[in-house]
Amino acid sequence: MSDETKFEPRIVAFLCNWCTYAGADLAGTGRKQYQANVRVIKLPCTGGIDPLFLIKAFERGADGILVSGCHPGDCHYNSGNYHARRRWNVFRPLLEFCGINPERIQFSWISAAEGGKWVETINGVVDSVRALGPFEGYHKINAIGPDASSEKS
Amino acid sequence: MIEALRKKAEELLRSKTVDVVYGYGEGSVPERTRPVFITKPEDVNKLTWNKYCVYNLTTYLKKQEARKLGKPAIVVKGCDAKTITVLIKESQIKREDIYIIGVTCTGIGEPPATKCKACDVNTPLIYDELIGEKIENKEFSFDERYAELDEYEKLSEKEKWDFWQKQFAKCIKCYACSSICPLCFCDRCIVDKNQPQWIDPSAHPRGNLSWNVTRAYHLAGRCINCEECQRVCPADIPLNLLNKKLAKETEKNFKYRSGYNVDDELAMATYKEDDSEDIFK
Amino acid sequence: MEKTLKKENFNSLITGLKDKGYKTIAPKKDNNLVMLDEVQSADEIHLDHVQTNNSVKEFFLPKTEKILSYKIEKNKVSMEEPEGFAVKTVIFGSRPCDAASLPVMDKVFNWDCSDKFWVERREAITVVTIACDKCDSYCFCTSVNLAPDSKEGSDVLLTKISDDEYLVETVTEKGEGLIKELETVFSDPAGGTPERQIASVEKKFEIDKVKPWLDENFVNKVWAEFSTKCIGCGACTFVCPTCHCFDIVDECTMSKGDRVKNWDGCQFKMFTLHTSGHNPRSTQDQRWRQRIMHKFKYYVEKFDNILCVGCGRCSRVCPADMNISEMLEIIATEDNQKE
């Protein structure tokens, strides 16, 4: 990654099983192309995503993160995404306050039917993180201890 | 005021209303006080009150060693009293299990603590007995309340990162910040869990960032701004800035201030359908 | 060997050290704290303090340190040990109590096996101490058989003899070598007996009475009475120059990792918690007792040394104003009878 023109961001996407994951699946079945920089982690609900998951992703070399779940009102468990929304509304400013560019942590609502929105969103995330460049700050502090960013995934 | 405090404590102990009084006593040096636990009416002269009574004594409600002494009366300032409201809301204590001796306070510490600058609880909002002349609580605007954040918020992204990296580098992972926090009451902290190891226990930049961010976040919508974490930090990290930032976001987004009203729903345990959607695509 | 060092020559001393390839650690002002830290020039050095907030411990036993890295590939495990951790360093301006902690801890780090991280750093680091010209009410070095101008553990001892001059006494060969290396910076004493400016530290208790009491009073209500206010944070153990407990953890992914040594402390509940859930020191008074017992009884029995140098840091930093010398005063004046 020393050559900046070759920088390919690593994006970790935490997706809700009931909507965005299915939406991403739909994009695949529909043979829609999107940038291959994303590693998807499927979870039952955005309400169950602890902010530590995001910190861990950065610790393990992510340059950007996407959290995506059901549209408000559509939660499989009624209110998980509403709780998640509260969480991210305070967590993101906290990271920003600590000097982490908020563009590196993005959120979206994508339903199981929105394969197109998934493609659009993930391309948007990859492009904006690519423009920001590698997350040098975190890569530097990851240098102590095992840094999985050099590991093949 | 000290006399009134001692008299009340003596009365409570004699009548067996409580078994122990958590209060302030003389410290190692005149500029310091220390927590004292008075169990005998004849010992009430050990109680004192002055501008060095910095401790938030409600933290002892989570300590088995203090709880063993029986039903407590706690001497609280306005800021400390907010903790009790949160502890009741979070089902950690029952209102009837403690006796609250509120003291009116016009600021503590030398130089005065930052929290005292925009203090709107000179008179505690919750108490059983009030010691000292009742003071009309002031009101401050949103901007005044969070004024100390301004100079940090306007830093550039890189300056922010560098500032906090420098601060966190000093962390020695003694966890005094969470030990002193009356609202850090988990029997087993996330940092002590190692299956999986969520937070690296090492005091290196990565472990320190994860720890300090997580500690602050776990107080989102809960911290009552007693500033104890910052006071006790042996590495002098301005931890309260993080807490205050979260309090600001909580108030901005959810119109919620922790510890002010026992009837409010806890900010992070509830939601509204019309919560801000700004950051969602 | 006796020399003198003028304050105006501090700069040539620091640059001289740099030229000779030394890293220099000295007290530095950092907001509200005075910290021993790396300095590049004499302007950064801060000497108008009683005690630095951190002790010299972290330069010999860092708060976190990698002791090996490993990789697991198929049927092979490869390991790599760190090198170059012992850097040629001079610690300038630490206090005599801090320096005195080093020979005490040498005993434990050279006991059943020799800890190479400690030993190699001890060899690489030269300690230039400045005798205390002031103290505060937390200091109690004189109560633990030390003094504000003790030479134990120092390689060179500086003592203030006027506002801008220090008397330089070499204590060890290593110290003598250092002075010779930088000869031009030092002057010859003017002759006569210079007036040494040394703080007078009040003696608070008879240390000889402490151990006999501890021998008899493993069970005593004093422990709990004194420690109800303890919040169990362990800040005392981390700032202590003689507390040396550490924890070893692996920071790893599935295929590789680092084995890391981190400071740990007996005041934490987790310190003694067993996997079964049983905790032999389940309450804070037991943990507080352990700290006192280890310092003034167990260590004495094992290594014939008190594990305390009377720096007073634990009492200064304590969030609940637990004062160790106060505890020892209580012990030393208690009737030496088991309850």
Image (spheres, grey):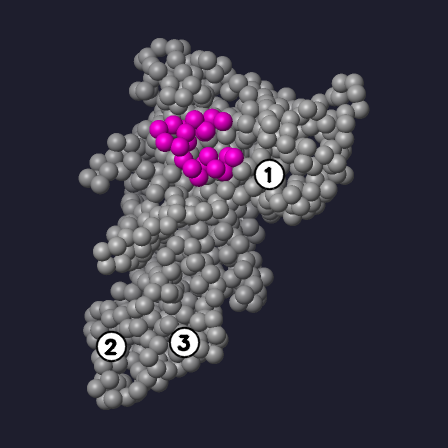
Is residue B57 a member of the stretch shown in magenta? no
Specify the label residue A21 is tagged with.
2
Q: Residue at x 42, y 55 (%)?
A: A144
In 3D space, how far apart are the residues under numbered discs 1 and 2 (Cα atoms)?
59 Å
Whether residue C146 is visible here, answered yes or no, is yes
**Chain part drawn in magenta:** C103-123
State which chain disc 2 sits on.
Answer: A
The kind of secondary structure element at disc 3 is: loop
State which chain disc 1 sits on.
Answer: C
Residue beneath label 3, please?
Answer: A8
Question: Mark 1 belongs to which amino acid?
Answer: Val
Q: Position of residue C39 (x, y in %)?
A: 63, 46
Q: Depth check: B236 or B183 in front?
A: B236
In 3D space, how far apart are the residues under numbered discs 1 and 3 (Cα atoms)?
45 Å
How packed mark 3 is, by other alpha carbons closer than 10 Å (few <14, some 14-19, many 20 or more), is some
Q: Main secondary structure of the magenta part?
A: helix
Task: State which quarter of the image contains the C terminus of chain C.
Answer: top left
- Give the side of residue B37 with respect to residue A70, left or right: right
Q: Position of residue C243 (x, y in %)?
A: 43, 32
Q: Report which quarter residue B251 is drawn in.
A: bottom left
Q: Nearer the viewer, mark 3 or mark 2?
A: 3
Q: Depth check: A71 or B59 in front?
A: A71
Question: Mark 2 belongs to which amino acid?
Answer: Tyr
The kind of secondary structure element at disc 1 is: strand
Residue beneath label 1, please?
Answer: C90
State which chain disc 3 sits on.
Answer: A
How packed mark 1 is, by other alpha carbons closer than 10 Å (few <14, some 14-19, many 20 or more), is many
Q: Position of residue C115 (x, y in %)?
A: 41, 35
